Amino acid sequence: MLRKVISRRIIAEREEELPLSTMGELIKIAEENKGIISLGPGEPDFNTPKHIINFACKKLREGYTHYSSPAGRHGLREAIAKKLRKNNKIDVSPDQVIVTAGSTEAILLALMCTTDPGEGVLLPDPGFLAYRPTVETLSGMPLCVPHYEDAGFQFEVEEARKAILPEKTNVLIINSPSNPTGVVYKKKTLEKIADFACEYDLLIISDEAYERLVYGGEKHVSIGSLNGMENRVLTLHTFSKTYAMPGFRVGYAAGPECLINAMKKLHLYTTVCAPTISQEAALAALKGPQGCVSKMVKEYDRRRKLITERLNDIPGISCIEPRGAFYAFPNISSFGMKSFDFTMWLLKNARVATTPGTEFGKLGEGYVRCSFATSYEKINTAMDRVEKATKVLNKRKKKTR
């Protein structure tokens, strides 16, 4: 029997309509050319602390290789609830916590449980690159809230009012400290967001993946800790950034028990559970010494100061000081090039890899993201290369005036 190739369309429209990401292409180019210094990574360059690795190895030998419950291992959820009460001032029980395969899965589960087709989700622009595609995959409406450099990339309620469709919007996503801008929302900003959410009866999904990575005397505040917000906020965290554990794929969400229960139910049909051995490693991270975290944050801060100073010393580039995460988000619009074109130009002419700002939304045009999750020495060399290469662009600008 002659078997024919499938002639009908087999790829769903939701996938075909997703925006193409340039991240994969840029990472591939950087990996294949060892002469390129990459400022693109969205993960720590530190190795996972040894006490966490050793504990995980011990548990593997003891046979912790089976499924966990969709909610997550009880001991870990107890430790998370204790951590949230102590560090984030969020009072939850272990039953109000779900452990997920990274906080990105928590975003997906939360939106699947709260957003029906055609409903709107408010999200930051520029903002983490997974927000909009996830909403679109679920046939929801991304309602982008502009974050402007002139306002320090802080959330502005006035902009959210312009974006919201009151009868069709149930969810607001916020991200502080922010990827890609490095902004940390002020407590006053969070209080305004809380009032806005109450006014429009919104659930807030608060992505706090970089909670421990704050600098310059800045303080991270969880919006779920504010008075009266305990039943209106789903707080997301991850072990990837704080403990340099991205490959373990373990994060968690905490919030209203009804929503957590819905996520647990759905979890059975996605990944079933977060990896059991990763959950054991996460428990070791929470209960073990925390000096490793302080050490990493101190080094990130040293790099942050360097990259901010160096970027602002380069004619044609300006960069507000990031106070959180491990990204700088310099403005390169004076060169008259699109973000993607500038990124490719740097790759070719400076052998430095950055990420186009447009990966993070329309308002990322005119910016590039530079990660300082790479060594101090490499950052310094990368800035030397960028400074030298952009002299050509600055000469062109002078000629065209």
Image: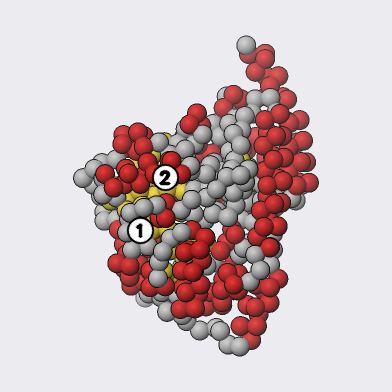
Residue type highlighted by circle 1: Glu
Left or right of 251, for residue 195: left
In primary-sequence order, the first of circles 1 and 2 is: 2
Q: Alpha carbon of mark 1 to alpha carbon of mark 2: how far?
A: 14 Å
* Picture coordinates of residue 158, whole percent (x, y): 35, 33
Q: Mark 1 falls on what kind of element?
A: loop
Q: Which residue carries the number 2 mark?
A: 190
* Picture coordinates of residue 10, whole percent (x, y): 36, 60
Q: Which residue carries the number 1 mark?
A: 230
Image quadrant for the C terminus? top right
Between 241 and 390, the residue placed more toward the observer is 241
What's the residue at 72%, 40% (across, down)?
Answer: 306
Residue 107 occupies which quadrant of the picture? bottom left
For disc 1, the neighbor class at 10 Å (few under 14, some 14 to 19, many from 20) is: some
Circles 1 and 2 in contact, beta carbons < 8 Å: no
In the rendered structure, find residue 218 and report the number of the disc placed on it: none
What's the residue at 29%, 47% (across, down)?
Answer: 198
* Picture coordinates of residue 154, whole percent (x, y): 47, 38
